[in-house]
Amino acid sequence: LAPSVSENDPQKEGLPLKPITALDKPSEKTAEVLRELEDRVIEILKGVDTPAKGLLFRGISKLPDIKGFAEKYKLNAACIATYPMYKGVAKVVGMDVIDGLDTIEGEVDALKELYDKYNFFFLHIKKTDSYGEDGNFDAKVKIIEEADRYLSKIKGMKFGAIAVTGDHSTPALLKSHSWHPLPLMINSPYAIADDVKRFTERECAKGILGKVYSKEIMYLLLAYSLKLDKFGA
Protein backbone atom coordinates (compact mmCIF):
# COMPACT_ATOMS: atom_id res chain seq x y z
CA LEU A 1 0.00 0.00 0.00
CA ALA A 2 1.10 3.58 -0.71
CA PRO A 3 -0.27 6.77 0.93
CA SER A 4 -0.85 9.19 -1.97
CA VAL A 5 -4.65 9.18 -1.84
CA SER A 6 -7.12 12.08 -1.90
CA GLU A 7 -9.28 12.81 1.14
CA ASN A 8 -13.06 12.38 1.07
CA ASP A 9 -13.83 15.17 3.57
CA PRO A 10 -15.82 18.00 1.86
CA GLN A 11 -14.83 20.29 4.80
CA LYS A 12 -18.41 21.58 5.20
CA GLU A 13 -21.56 20.03 6.61
CA GLY A 14 -24.36 19.15 4.20
CA LEU A 15 -22.07 18.35 1.27
CA PRO A 16 -21.55 14.85 -0.19
CA LEU A 17 -18.31 12.97 0.45
CA LYS A 18 -15.61 13.66 -2.10
CA PRO A 19 -14.45 10.72 -4.24
CA ILE A 20 -11.39 8.85 -3.00
CA THR A 21 -8.80 8.68 -5.77
CA ALA A 22 -5.20 7.57 -6.09
CA LEU A 23 -2.76 10.40 -6.78
CA ASP A 24 -0.15 8.06 -8.24
CA LYS A 25 0.07 4.51 -9.58
CA PRO A 26 1.43 2.83 -6.39
CA SER A 27 -1.51 4.21 -4.37
CA GLU A 28 -4.29 2.69 -6.49
CA LYS A 29 -4.67 -0.32 -4.18
CA THR A 30 -4.95 1.96 -1.14
CA ALA A 31 -7.69 4.00 -2.81
CA GLU A 32 -9.54 0.82 -3.74
CA VAL A 33 -9.41 -0.49 -0.15
CA LEU A 34 -10.61 2.84 1.27
CA ARG A 35 -13.50 3.09 -1.21
CA GLU A 36 -14.63 -0.41 -0.27
CA LEU A 37 -14.36 0.40 3.43
CA GLU A 38 -16.30 3.63 2.91
CA ASP A 39 -19.14 1.80 1.11
CA ARG A 40 -19.35 -0.92 3.76
CA VAL A 41 -19.44 1.57 6.63
CA ILE A 42 -22.19 3.63 4.96
CA GLU A 43 -24.24 0.48 4.42
CA ILE A 44 -23.81 -0.65 8.04
CA LEU A 45 -24.76 2.77 9.43
CA LYS A 46 -28.03 2.78 7.48
CA GLY A 47 -29.36 0.20 9.93
CA VAL A 48 -28.07 1.88 13.09
CA ASP A 49 -29.77 4.60 15.13
CA THR A 50 -26.94 7.14 15.06
CA PRO A 51 -26.33 10.61 13.57
CA ALA A 52 -23.21 9.21 11.87
CA LYS A 53 -23.61 8.57 8.15
CA GLY A 54 -20.11 7.55 7.10
CA LEU A 55 -16.36 7.89 7.64
CA LEU A 56 -14.11 10.85 6.89
CA PHE A 57 -10.63 9.95 5.66
CA ARG A 58 -8.19 12.79 6.27
CA GLY A 59 -4.42 13.05 6.35
CA ILE A 60 -3.91 9.66 4.73
CA SER A 61 -0.26 8.79 5.20
CA LYS A 62 2.19 6.22 6.50
CA LEU A 63 4.43 6.13 9.55
CA PRO A 64 7.14 8.74 8.94
CA ASP A 65 10.80 7.90 9.39
CA ILE A 66 11.74 10.52 11.97
CA LYS A 67 13.85 10.60 15.11
CA GLY A 68 12.05 9.85 18.33
CA PHE A 69 11.69 12.53 20.99
CA ALA A 70 14.13 10.83 23.35
CA GLU A 71 16.77 10.44 20.64
CA LYS A 72 16.48 14.00 19.37
CA TYR A 73 16.07 15.92 22.63
CA LYS A 74 17.25 13.41 25.29
CA LEU A 75 13.98 13.86 27.17
CA ASN A 76 11.44 11.43 28.62
CA ALA A 77 8.16 12.87 27.33
CA ALA A 78 4.47 12.37 28.11
CA CYS A 79 1.43 13.53 26.16
CA ILE A 80 -1.60 14.72 28.14
CA ALA A 81 -4.43 15.23 25.66
CA THR A 82 -8.08 14.37 25.08
CA TYR A 83 -8.27 14.28 21.27
CA PRO A 84 -7.09 11.15 19.40
CA MET A 85 -5.11 12.92 16.67
CA TYR A 86 -2.75 14.58 19.14
CA LYS A 87 -2.28 11.28 20.95
CA GLY A 88 -1.38 9.66 17.63
CA VAL A 89 1.16 12.33 16.74
CA ALA A 90 2.66 12.02 20.23
CA LYS A 91 3.04 8.25 19.80
CA VAL A 92 4.74 8.75 16.43
CA VAL A 93 7.44 10.91 18.05
CA GLY A 94 7.88 8.53 20.98
CA MET A 95 5.92 10.17 23.78
CA ASP A 96 4.03 8.11 26.34
CA VAL A 97 0.31 8.84 25.96
CA ILE A 98 -1.83 9.28 29.06
CA ASP A 99 -5.35 7.97 28.37
CA GLY A 100 -8.71 8.38 30.10
CA LEU A 101 -8.77 12.19 30.28
CA ASP A 102 -11.68 14.38 29.17
CA THR A 103 -11.43 17.67 31.10
CA ILE A 104 -8.85 20.39 31.64
CA GLU A 105 -8.99 19.71 35.37
CA GLY A 106 -8.23 16.04 34.73
CA GLU A 107 -5.33 16.94 32.46
CA VAL A 108 -3.77 19.23 35.07
CA ASP A 109 -4.29 16.62 37.80
CA ALA A 110 -2.50 14.06 35.60
CA LEU A 111 0.32 16.53 35.07
CA LYS A 112 0.80 16.90 38.81
CA GLU A 113 0.56 13.14 39.42
CA LEU A 114 3.16 12.33 36.75
CA TYR A 115 5.49 15.24 37.48
CA ASP A 116 8.29 13.07 38.90
CA LYS A 117 8.04 10.39 36.19
CA TYR A 118 8.79 12.55 33.12
CA ASN A 119 10.91 15.60 32.33
CA PHE A 120 8.81 16.89 29.41
CA PHE A 121 5.04 17.24 29.10
CA PHE A 122 2.90 18.12 26.09
CA LEU A 123 -0.48 19.23 27.48
CA HIS A 124 -3.08 19.94 24.82
CA ILE A 125 -6.51 21.58 25.19
CA LYS A 126 -8.79 20.80 22.26
CA LYS A 127 -11.98 22.79 22.80
CA THR A 128 -10.52 26.19 21.91
CA ASP A 129 -10.14 24.81 18.37
CA SER A 130 -13.54 23.07 18.39
CA TYR A 131 -15.44 26.19 19.41
CA GLY A 132 -13.46 28.26 16.92
CA GLU A 133 -14.56 25.96 14.10
CA ASP A 134 -18.15 26.20 15.38
CA GLY A 135 -17.92 29.99 15.22
CA ASN A 136 -18.81 30.11 18.92
CA PHE A 137 -16.73 33.03 20.15
CA ASP A 138 -18.23 33.16 23.66
CA ALA A 139 -17.64 29.44 24.32
CA LYS A 140 -14.07 29.76 23.08
CA VAL A 141 -13.47 32.65 25.47
CA LYS A 142 -14.83 30.58 28.38
CA ILE A 143 -12.50 27.67 27.58
CA ILE A 144 -9.50 30.01 27.45
CA GLU A 145 -10.58 31.52 30.78
CA GLU A 146 -10.97 28.02 32.26
CA ALA A 147 -7.46 27.07 31.13
CA ASP A 148 -6.13 30.34 32.51
CA ARG A 149 -7.39 29.46 35.99
CA TYR A 150 -5.03 26.46 36.07
CA LEU A 151 -1.87 28.32 35.04
CA SER A 152 -0.89 29.28 38.59
CA LYS A 153 -1.23 25.63 39.65
CA ILE A 154 0.99 24.52 36.75
CA LYS A 155 3.52 27.27 37.50
CA GLY A 156 3.58 26.13 41.12
CA MET A 157 4.91 22.72 40.04
CA LYS A 158 8.30 24.41 39.47
CA PHE A 159 9.04 23.39 35.89
CA GLY A 160 12.33 24.58 34.43
CA ALA A 161 10.41 26.23 31.60
CA ILE A 162 6.77 26.47 30.51
CA ALA A 163 5.53 27.48 27.06
CA VAL A 164 1.94 28.53 26.40
CA THR A 165 0.92 28.74 22.75
CA GLY A 166 -1.17 27.01 20.07
CA ASP A 167 -0.49 24.73 17.14
CA HIS A 168 -2.55 26.90 14.77
CA SER A 169 -5.07 29.73 14.80
CA THR A 170 -8.83 29.01 14.55
CA PRO A 171 -10.68 32.35 14.49
CA ALA A 172 -14.38 32.07 15.32
CA LEU A 173 -14.97 34.63 12.56
CA LEU A 174 -13.64 32.22 9.92
CA LYS A 175 -14.88 28.97 11.53
CA SER A 176 -11.68 27.41 10.23
CA HIS A 177 -7.94 27.09 10.70
CA SER A 178 -6.05 30.13 9.48
CA TRP A 179 -2.60 31.53 8.71
CA HIS A 180 -2.55 34.05 11.58
CA PRO A 181 0.46 34.09 13.92
CA LEU A 182 0.04 32.75 17.44
CA PRO A 183 0.90 34.29 20.80
CA LEU A 184 3.77 32.57 22.63
CA MET A 185 4.67 32.93 26.29
CA ILE A 186 7.65 31.27 27.98
CA ASN A 187 7.94 31.23 31.76
CA SER A 188 11.30 30.42 33.32
CA PRO A 189 13.51 31.68 36.15
CA TYR A 190 15.98 32.62 33.39
CA ALA A 191 13.55 34.43 31.08
CA ILE A 192 13.96 38.17 30.58
CA ALA A 193 10.78 40.01 31.52
CA ASP A 194 9.36 42.49 29.03
CA ASP A 195 6.58 45.08 29.11
CA VAL A 196 3.84 42.86 27.65
CA LYS A 197 0.91 42.69 30.08
CA ARG A 198 -1.70 40.74 28.08
CA PHE A 199 -1.48 37.36 26.32
CA THR A 200 -2.86 38.35 22.91
CA GLU A 201 -1.58 38.21 19.36
CA ARG A 202 -1.03 41.98 19.18
CA GLU A 203 0.65 42.25 22.57
CA CYS A 204 2.93 39.24 22.12
CA ALA A 205 4.13 40.68 18.82
CA LYS A 206 5.73 43.45 20.92
CA GLY A 207 7.45 41.01 23.28
CA ILE A 208 11.11 40.17 23.71
CA LEU A 209 10.77 36.80 21.93
CA GLY A 210 9.88 38.51 18.66
CA LYS A 211 8.74 36.27 15.81
CA VAL A 212 9.58 32.63 16.50
CA TYR A 213 9.00 29.72 14.14
CA SER A 214 7.36 26.77 15.86
CA LYS A 215 10.30 24.50 15.00
CA GLU A 216 12.50 26.75 17.19
CA ILE A 217 10.38 26.56 20.36
CA MET A 218 11.86 23.29 21.62
CA TYR A 219 15.37 24.73 21.50
CA LEU A 220 14.21 27.82 23.39
CA LEU A 221 12.65 25.61 26.07
CA LEU A 222 15.82 23.55 26.35
CA ALA A 223 17.82 26.76 26.72
CA TYR A 224 15.49 28.32 29.29
CA SER A 225 15.53 25.09 31.35
CA LEU A 226 19.36 24.92 31.16
CA LYS A 227 19.37 21.70 29.16
CA LEU A 228 21.61 22.91 26.33
CA ASP A 229 25.40 22.85 26.20
CA LYS A 230 27.13 26.08 27.12
CA PHE A 231 26.70 28.84 24.54
CA GLY A 232 30.00 29.90 23.00
CA ALA A 233 33.57 28.83 23.76
Image: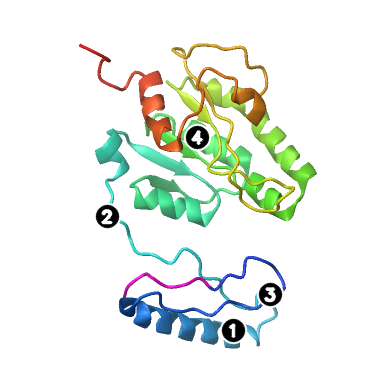
Which residue corresponds to mark 1?
Answer: 42
Q: Residue furthest right?
A: 138
109 in relation to 22, above or below: above
- Determine the image quadrant of residue 150: top right
Q: Look at label 3 and name its amino acid.
A: Leu
Front residue of 108 and 8: 8
196 in relation to 68, above or below: above
Q: Find residue 115 and report its horizontal and vertical position in percent.
A: 44, 30
* Colouring style: rainbow
Q: Earlier in the sequence, mark 1 or mark 3?
A: 3
Q: Can residue 40 be seen from the camera position used here?
A: yes
Which residue corresponds to mark 4?
Answer: 111
Q: Are marks 4 and 1 in contact (CB under 8 Å)?
A: no
Identify which residue is drawn at 20% across, 11% down.
233
Q: CA distance from mark 3 to mark 2?
A: 35 Å
Front residue of 112 and 61: 61
Mark 4 residue crowding within 10 angstroms, few (<14) / some (14–19) / many (20+):
many
Q: Look at label 1 and name its amino acid.
A: Ile
**Mark 1 element type:** helix
Mark 2 residue crowding within 10 angstroms, few (<14) / some (14–19) / many (20+):
few
Identify which residue is drawn at 63% across, 65% down.
11
